[in-house]
Image (cartoon, helix red, strand yellow):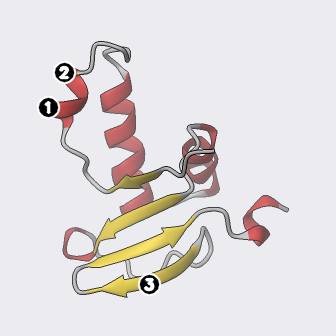
Amino acid sequence: MRRRFLAQGVRLYLLLQDQSISKDEPFERLSRSVSFANQPSMDVVRKLQARNVTGFVVILSLTKRDNWSQYGRELFRVGNYAYIDLTYSSLNE
């Protein structure tokens, strides 16, 4: 199984060049990315998990939020980045 993560605000240009995905997918990824970073919800987490996303990299300077503990476990924070584990067991209960 491949581990996957999503980084806040992934650049659309690279995704739009990928002919193997639908044209709507890059915009859906961007929407979920921004939603989780700024206004997380269990709905957004479930949508990320449905796409096999197991973690999320937050760029701290791009959001006012500082705590995602209700939605995942922060495994580490380095400089301007935080990594949130979306497989945290209490989320799946």
Residue at screen point 69% across, 70% down = 88
Outermost residue, right side:
93
The answer to which of marks 1 and 3 sits earlier in the sequence is 1
Residue at screen point 43% across, 73% down = 83
Task: Using the image as rendered, state which of residue 65 and residue 8 is in the foreground.
Answer: 8
How far is mark 1 from mark 3, CA to CA? 28 Å
- The kind of residue on which mark 2 rests is Gln
In percent of width and height, residue 16 lies at 21, 23
- The kind of residue on which mark 3 rests is Phe
- The circle on residue 76 is 3
The local crowd at label 1, few if under 14, some if 14 to 19, many if 20 or more residues have their Cα within 10 Å, is few
The answer to whether the residues at label 2 and label 1 have Cβ atoms under 8 Å apart is yes
- The kind of residue on which mark 1 rests is Tyr
How far is mark 2 from mark 1, CA to CA? 6 Å
In percent of width and height, residue 30 lies at 32, 41
* Residue 89 placement, left or right of 10: right
Which residue was labeled with disc 1? 13
Element type where label 1 sits in the image: helix
State whether residue 38 is above or below residue 18.
below
* Residue 9 placement, left or right of 32: left
Q: Quadrant of the C terminus?
A: bottom right
Element type where label 3 sits in the image: strand
Residue at screen point 25% across, 29% down = 15
Which residue was labeled with disc 2? 17
Q: Quadrant of the N terminus?
A: top right
